[in-house]
Image (cartoon, rainbow, N blue to C red):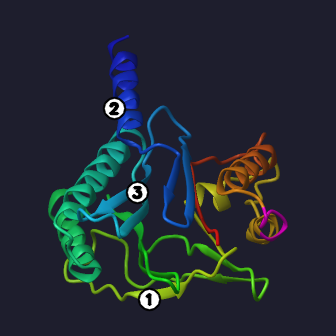
Amino acid sequence: TNLKADLDKARQLQKSILPEHEYKFHNYDIFGLTDPAEIVGGDFFDYLEIGDDQDRLGIAVGDAASKGVSAAAEAMYISGALRMASNFEIKITPLMKRMNQLVNKIFEDDKFSSLFYGELSTDKNGLFLYTNAGHNPPLFYSSRKNKVEYLLVTGPVLGPVPHAKYQIESINFAPGDILLMFSDGIVESTNSKGEPYPEVKLINLLKNNKTKTPKEIALHILDDVIRFTKNGTYSDDKTLVVIKRNE
């Protein structure tokens, strides 16, 4: 049918826009993947090279709230706007303000999107600046403390509140530290009893695989979530991005 052909085209387009899974930025290794629940999905992630001298890298993970094709369209729109903005080296706060106003203007009220956006730099102390617009708090594993902390929400989802403010927070990556970003399809997809995937499982997987590469960590988690939710009652797009600082 024509609809099937259109969906296949949309899927190809969406795939062509997503970045390569693996990425290296100075002493950081990064791996991201997205596994849509339907043919096309509302999840996206991106790596954004900022400026010409390769000294900053933006990392975005987002989740457009509607379903199917309209979610995919919104996801592609937001990731495209972010890519364009990264060419102009806009600071994080005005960037988020503009993104929010764009989504507010273009999409209806029920079509909002969560977005986690952070920037790595060549800073020796591993400074990572981030803002979290209503997205699942990423997990930051400190190898020195052997502890996981959450990077909590710093502002509302994009769209509904036109004049929203977005705080910037920061963490410092020491060698061996890992940041795990994910969409709610990871922790809300359910098993056959209707129970969601427990976040404590996620934390334990992160700790138990701390010596592995970001690719191994991401695939291990995805595999575990898929096994857990095999006969589940609810499934959503699943996205994971893992950043690890080496020496």
Rendered location of residue 44, percent (x, y): 43, 51
Residue at which label 1 appears: 169
Q: What's the residue at 24%, 79% (across, down)? A: 91
The boundaries of the magenta stretch are 207-211
Q: What's the residue at 64%, 72% (across, down)? A: 247
Q: Is residue 21 magenta?
A: no
Residue at which label 2 appears: 13
How far is mark 2 from mark 1, CA to CA?
Answer: 34 Å
Rendered location of residue 155, percent (x, y): 38, 83
- Residue 94 lies in what quarter of the image? bottom left
- Residue 242 lies in what quarter of the image? bottom right
Rendered location of residue 111, percent (x, y): 32, 58
Task: Name the residue type under label 2.
Answer: Leu
User: Is 140 on the left or on the right of 156, as rendered?
Assistant: right
How far is mark 3 from mark 1, CA to CA?
Answer: 19 Å
Q: What's the residue at 24%, 65% (across, down)? A: 51
Q: Main secondary structure of the magenta part?
A: loop
N-terminal-most mark, 2 or 1? 2
Give the crowd class for mark 2: few <14, some 14-19, many >=20 residues within 10 Å. few
Q: Eyeballing the image, is 242 above or below 178?
A: above
Determine the secondary structure under disc 1.
Answer: strand
User: Is 166 on the left or on the right of 201, as rendered?
Assistant: left
Determine the secondary structure under disc 3.
Answer: strand
Residue at which label 3 appears: 47
Task: Name the residue type under label 1.
Answer: Glu
